[in-house]
């Protein structure tokens, strides 16, 4: 959907430059361009938020690992460790909230628990796909 929107905006901009500002197409292009620009700005805003969230969630580990890593097994191990750390942190936050420790709000606890849940679900899906790929490879004729 996003790709279609962007290509439509590019096509309208090309039409505008081809026909000049005095044609009927230019008026139609301007109306459409305003509508698309609003949609694109909203999409860019969401992308910036996702990028910021990914950087915070990754804690720089993805940037520091680089290409020189040890391969799939090392990346899988790092991911499982991040998932485990996230779950431990969320459990600690929940326990601190239950004990009534100051500085721990319900909002933070719920967000941490949801982050841990999403991370676990992602890890589970990756495991399921790896197992399915392994089974498919094992069922190939020799």
Image (cartoon, grey):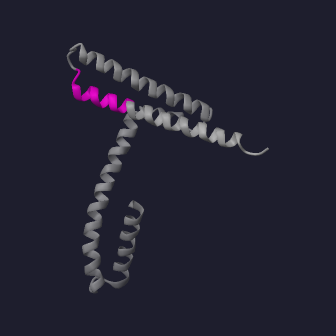
Which percent across, then down, holds residue 72? 60, 35
In depth, the one of 132 and 54 nearer the eye is: 132
Quadrant including the C terminus = top right
In the image, is 73 to the left or to the right of 80?
right
Where on the picture, by quarter, is residue 44? Answer: bottom left
Residue 130 painted magenta: no
Quadrant including the N terminus = bottom left
Where on the picture, by quarter, is residue 108? Answer: top left
In the image, is 84 to the left or to the right of 25?
right
Which percent across, then down, holds residue 48? 34, 47
Q: Which residues are magenta?
A: 104-116
Question: Does 108 sit above or below residue 32?
Answer: above
Question: Does 75 sit above or below residue 88?
Answer: below
Which percent across, then down, holds residue 35? 26, 67
Residue 113 painted magenta: yes
Question: Does 2 sit above or below residue 80?
Answer: below
| Prevalent SS, magenta region | helix
């Amino acid at each position: 959907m996003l790709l279609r929107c962007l290509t439509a905006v590019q096509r309208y901009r090309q039409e505008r430059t081809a026909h000049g500002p005095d044609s009927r197409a230019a008026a139609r292009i301007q109306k459409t361009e305003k509508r698309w620009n609003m949609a694109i700005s909203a999409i860019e805003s969401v992308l910036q938020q996702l990028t910021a969230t990914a950087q915070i969630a990754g804690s720089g580990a993805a940037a520091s690992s680089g290409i020189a890593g040890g391969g799939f097994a090392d990346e899988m191990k790092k991911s499982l460790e991040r998932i485990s750390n996230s779950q431990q942190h969320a459990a600690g936050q929940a326990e601190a909230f239950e004990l009534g420790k100051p500085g721990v709000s319900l909002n933070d606890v719920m967000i941490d628990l949801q982050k841990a849940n999403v991370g676990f679900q992602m890890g589970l899906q990756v495991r399921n796909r790896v197992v399915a790929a392994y089974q498919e490879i094992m069922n190939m004729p020799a």
